[in-house]
Image (tube, rainbow, N blue to C red):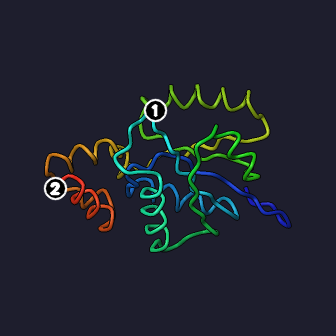
Amino acid sequence: MRNKGKTRTGIYPGTFDPVTKGHLHLIRRASRLVDHLIIAVADSPGKKPLFNLKQRCDMVAADIKNMPEKGCAIEVRGFDNLLVDFARQSKAACIFRGLRAVSDFEYEFQLCGMNAKLDPSIEMVYLMASDKWQFVSASMVKEVASLGGNIDEFVTPQVAKRLKARFKK
């Protein structure tokens, strides 16, 4: 996907409420395919996130800062508009999405079709989750944390600390 002489920008969007080790694994892989990767944290008020946009951006940024083996420059930015518009404004060539299971496929298939209609110049790139992370989702992590379960295997220590503090109340 790299192109000599031209910077290739990709976007990995999500709500990241919270960022999981599965997200970080996909970020690491996507960073090897472009020169500049923007982690686009969606405001998503309709999803009623546990953490506000700034908190989610801060969590992702802290995890990226400590990430070994980054393949390119990585930037974290929040957004509250249409993903395709954000990608266009960011001069992105592609949007990365992760697929964990067959249940993700139908939604992603529709999203891909819609995005292609809205802007056919932006490629959708799908990365299969590694078998280690296929069952991990931010919603599941939040549920386990809310019930006092151990989430240390699924998120970094800084995210675990924030989740535990949030559910302690």
Residue depicted at 66% across the width and 27% down the height: 114
Q: Are marks 1 and 2 in contact (CB under 8 Å)?
A: no
- Tell me if residue 110 comes above or below residue 92 in the rendering: above
The type of residue carrying mark 1 is: Asp
Determine whether, in the image, residue 44 is placed left or right of residue 132.
right
Under circle 2, the secondary element is helix
Q: Distance from label 1 to label 2 (Cα)?
A: 32 Å
Determine whether, in the image, residue 4 is placed left or right of residue 88.
right
- Tell me if residue 72 comes above or below residue 109 in the rendering: below
The type of residue carrying mark 2 is: Lys
Q: Camera-side residue: 14 or 26?
A: 14
Indicate the quadrant where residue 83 lies. top right
Q: Which mark is residue 60?
A: none
Relative image position of residue 26 (x, y in whole percent): 50, 55
Under circle 1, the secondary element is helix
Residue for badge 1: 104
Residue depicted at 35% across the width and 46% down the height: 138
- Tell me if residue 93 comes above or below residue 109 in the rendering: below
Residue depicted at 75% across the width and 45% down the height: 88
Q: Which mark is residue 168?
A: 2
Tell me the quadrant of the picture where the N terminus can be found. Answer: bottom right
Q: Residue furthest left?
A: 148
- Which of discs 1 and 2 lies nearer the camera? The answer is 2
Q: Earlier in the sequence, mark 1 or mark 2?
A: 1
Residue depicted at 40% across the width and 53% down the height: 22
